[in-house]
Each structure stands twice: as C-alpha cells, then as structure tokens.
Image (cartoon, grey):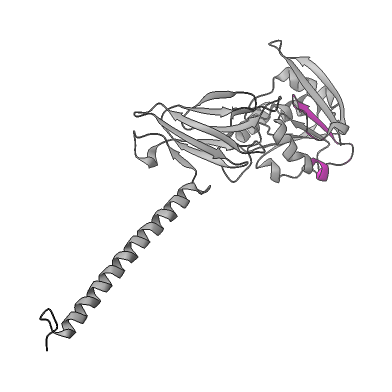
Amino acid sequence: MSDYFGLDPSQSVRRMSARRYAVAAFILIIAAAAGFLVFRSALDKTPLDRTVYVTAQAPARTVPRTTLRNVVPRDVNFTIEAATRPPKTFARKLEPGAVEILATDVPVEIVFFNGVRTVRQTVYPDRPYSFRLDESDLVKIYPGSHGRQDEADLAPYVPTPLEIIEKMLDTAAVTHNDVLYDIGCGDGRVVIAAARLRGARGVGIDIDPNLIEESRREARRQGVDGLTRFIRMDATQAGFTEATVVAVYLLPESLALLRPKFEAELRPGARIVSHQYLIPGWEDKLVRTDLVEDASGKSRKIHLYIR
C-alpha cells in the first residue's frame, strides 16, 4: 500500500521522525550556544576575573601585570585609557578591597573623580598601585608596596626622614624600657634608631621580604641586631600585646583598619606615635601634636596617642 505521495507509510513515518529529531537537535544546539554566551558574559563580569588586556604587542602570558587596589571604603569608578593602536578605553568599577589587574606593556592613563574634580594619572607596567584617601579625604593613586590579593597593603613605601624619626622618639618619650613596634617598617630605620639612640627593643613588620632583609642587614651593620627583630607578614594579622610604643606612618584608612587591633591588644598606657596622619575615631586619645620641619623645610606633624 502507498500513501498519497507514493511512499510506503512506514517510510513516511521514519522520515517525519528524522525531521523532528533534526529540528530538536538544532534547537538544543542553539540553546546550548545561548547558554554558553550567557555564562561567558557572567564570567567576564565576575570580580574573580579582574584582568584587563590593554596591549596587543605580545602573547597574554608574557605581558607585565600592573595592579590597582582599592583601599577606599567605597566603590571607585574609573576609566583606563591606553595609547595603543587602535586606542583602547575601558570603564571599570572597583569595590573596596578588590584588585584590578592590567596586562599592559605600555603606560596607561587612569581617569577618576577624586571627590572634587576629575583627574588623570599615569600608571606604568609591572608596578603595584592603590586608590587611597589623602589627608583631605580625596581619592588619590599611590604607588603600592605589592599587588597581592590575599594580604592587606597598608601603605606605599615612603621612608621617614631621620630627623623626623628622632622627633617621633622624643614625642613618644622612648627609653630602654620600651618595646617599640613599627608597622610598615620599610628599611627598618625607626626600629634601628630606637635601639641605637634609646636602647629600646624593637620589632619591625613589613609585607615586603626585600625590605625585611635590608632591615636585618642594616641592624647588623649598626650593631643593634640583638635588640631588633624584623618580621615579614601582613600587619593586620600580627599581634601587638608586647608593644609599649607603636610607630606608624600610614594613611588614614589603614589607621582606621588597625584601630580595632590597637584597642583590643595594646595595654593601657601604650603610646602610639603617628607621623603626619590622624587615627580616625581616636580623637579622645590624642594627647598632643608636634610640628617639625624636615631637612627640606617641609612642615610635618607628629601625633601622640595614649591607649
């Protein structure tokens, strides 16, 4: 028996089934492709994937990484402008504590609103930077001490002039009976000066292993390695219970981050001497502020707090 088209009914049914299977398979392929695109789009936006490629000059794995950390307690919106060919522009938002990674082998311009006006600043390949607040609570880009995402970056490395260190020791009345902790000790100069000039024991904490090694070498050179100890670690994870004096040269948001540790771990009567910046929320513990000029004639502030 044949159907209207001269085909065997069973053959017609098989052909209809094949067409249905083909249509179904096509729909599944389209759905899978759409699902992948949605997944890929979501992945591109996830905070875990923070790499922005602003170069076409080399394979991705060989391009230097520049990092931008947000230490400001709010989102920072900014634009990345790269003078590549063709020019590239990226609009980004960085949440508090997050790190943006720029894969670039050319300097790029970062354009952002600092709280008063729009500013632009150049960042360079293979260096760490941080969005931080300055003394006027304006957003500024500072060189960072590192670009790691698993440890806090409390401050850029800016050495304290030696004449300012001596004034800090005077303001805090450091003696041989004290144990001085320097948070973000850099090359160890505050701890070494306290040991050499006052006979105080000291502990320096810094995240940079090269600076810690430099501190140890200098302490040996100046003959105070028996009074000093230098530790490479994240200062937010350190313990301060032994300290009678704490020396800091940190920006306000980092001091605000450490303040709960000071309150929980420092013994009553411990002194905190801060170069230049006030500790937010500790107005009632501020004892005095001294003004002193450095060798270049620049006026600097030294604040003394009593726990």
Q: Residue furthest left?
A: 6
Q: Residue at x 74, y 39 (%)?
A: 258
Give x and y (percent) for residue 63. 40, 36
Task: Answer left or right for 192 relative to 29.
Answer: right
Please give the name of the residue rendered at 42% of the width and 33% of the height, measured from the top-left corner.
Answer: 104
- Of all residues, the one furthest to the bottom in this rendering is 1
| Residue 265 inside the magenta-drawn segment | yes
Does the segment drawn in magenta span residue 171? no
Query: What residue range appears in magenta?
Result: 262-281
Give the image location of residue 42, x and y in percent: 47, 52
**Quarter of the image containing the C terminus?**
top right
Position of residue 35 in the picture relative to residue 258 (left or right):
left
The quadrant where residue 206 appears: top right
Say which quarter of the image contains residue 145: top right
Quick one: quadrant of the N terminus?
Answer: bottom left
Residue closest to the eye, 106 or 293: 106
Residue at left offset 37%, top offset 62%: 31
Residue 94, position as x, y percentages in the image: 57, 39
Residue 155, picture quadrant? top right
In this rendered view, identify the residue nearer to me: 194 or 196: 194
Q: Which residue extends farthest top?
A: 297
Using the image, determine if residue 267 lies above or below residue 17.
above
Q: Is residue 183 above or below residue 277?
A: below
Is residue 146 in view from this perspective? no
| Residue 71 in view | yes
Total numbered badges shown on the rendered structure: 0
- What is the x, y in percent for residue 203? 73, 37
